[in-house]
Image (cartoon, rainbow, N blue to C red):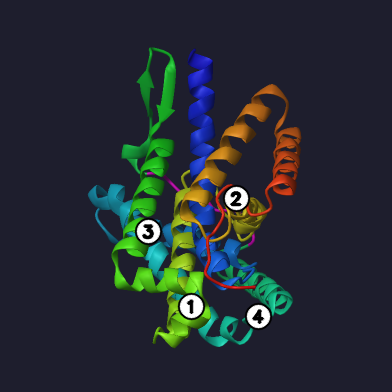
Amino acid sequence: METILTQVFNGISLGSIMLLIALGLAITFGLMNVINMAHGELIMVGAYMTYVTQIIFSQYLPSSLFGAYFLVAIPIAFIVAALIGLLLERYLIRYLYGRPLDSLLATWGISLILQQVARSIFGASNVAITSPEWLNGGLTVMGTVTFPYKRLFILFLVFSCLAALYLYLYRTTAGRRMQAVTLNRGMASCLGISTRKVDAYAFGLGSGLAGVAGCALTLIGPIGPMIGSYYIVDSFMVVVLGGVGKLIGTVAGGLSMGLLGTFFEYTTSATLAKVLVFTLIIAFLQWKPSGIVSVRTRTLD
């Protein structure tokens, strides 16, 4: 029983991390149909903003405040990544709408540039992040099963981001406009919605969520200029598996991949587990190409 509970928790934990990484991509890919290969580098930006915040707290502020640096780093990572996303959309992406191959190549070039900028500023080697004291240790249940506080905090962070995103999309005017553009861009434009502004805000929001994901990844291990490249394929798979443009589908896709990956890794090996997960996803998409949750649109083909 303890083994099953541990594996389920590990699967949900892994799935929540993948979900947080894929949330921003689900917005940009689902709304704008832009294949953003620089999404991983926006994750890297969030991770390095956490590193910079840690340095500022450790060198310029009293040691008693060091434990709060991570809570401060989360909004900083979101804001900086969102600003970079807005700049990318304003000066590059908006000229490539409707040209998926061009946008893929352009954002891939941007990803290489951002990686080189990170190497020039922080160096090519990985840097370590010191977790706050209150995130060390774990919660022990059933006497022998321990849930690390870091993973529990990531779960809480993912839930908070999902709740905030849900409230934004379904309870605010800007979020409803974003949904209207997703359903029917032409009709939304005819009704007076500025689709260009919606695209810019959506790209900024997706980039900001990528920054938050990068902040969360610093709790798992060291970070480096290539950290985003390790997760970009998995994040695309989560979005495609869940169903492009549906938040609940992204949640289902992330948790499914996490649970399957943990189960296969426990019974086989890490490399073979990833192969088996991708094979199952490909087989599932052959049966249901639209993903777990399909988008109902009002566009007539």
Residue topped by disc 1? 199
Q: Report whether residue 220 is seen.
A: no
Q: Please, what secondary structure does the residue beneath circle 3 have?
A: helix
Q: How far, Cα to Cα, is label 2 from label 3?
A: 17 Å
Numbered tag placed on residue 165 in the rendering? 3
Q: Report whether residue 36 is seen.
A: yes
Q: Please, what secondary structure does the residue beneath circle 1 have?
A: helix
Q: Which of marks 4 and 1 is nearer the N terminus?
A: 4
Q: Is the residue under label 1 in contact with that under label 2 (CB below 8 Å)?
A: no
Query: Given this view, does label 4 or label 3 mark the residue nearer the observer?
Result: 4
Numbered tag placed on residue 238 in the rendering? 2
Q: Which of marks 4 and 3 is nearer the N terminus?
A: 4
- Given the image, on which type of amino acid does mark 3 rest? Leu
Q: Is the residue under label 3 in contact with that under label 2 (CB below 8 Å)?
A: no
Q: How far, Cα to Cα, is label 1 from label 3?
A: 16 Å
Numbered tag placed on residue 208 in the rendering? none
Image vertical order of residue 136 relative to residue 47, above or below: above
Which residue is nearer to you in this view: 1 or 146?
A: 1
Q: Which of marks 2 and 1 is nearer the N terminus?
A: 1
- At x 40%, y 85%, the residue is 191
Q: In this view, does 159 lie to the left or right of 262?
A: left
Majority secondary structure of the magenta segment? loop
Numbered tag placed on residue 98 in the rendering? 4
Q: In which quarter of the image is residue 58?
A: bottom left
- Given the image, on which type of amino acid does mark 2 rest? Val
- At x 37%, y 63%, the residue is 169
Q: How far, Cα to Cα, is label 4 from label 3?
A: 26 Å
Question: Callout 3 environment at 10 Å: few (<14), some (14 to 19), or many (20+)?
Answer: some
Q: What stretch is highlighted in magenta?
A: 124-131
Query: Given this view, does label 2 or label 4 mark the residue nearer the observer?
Result: 4
What is the x, y in percent for residue 290? Answer: 64, 54
Say whether residue 125 is magenta.
yes
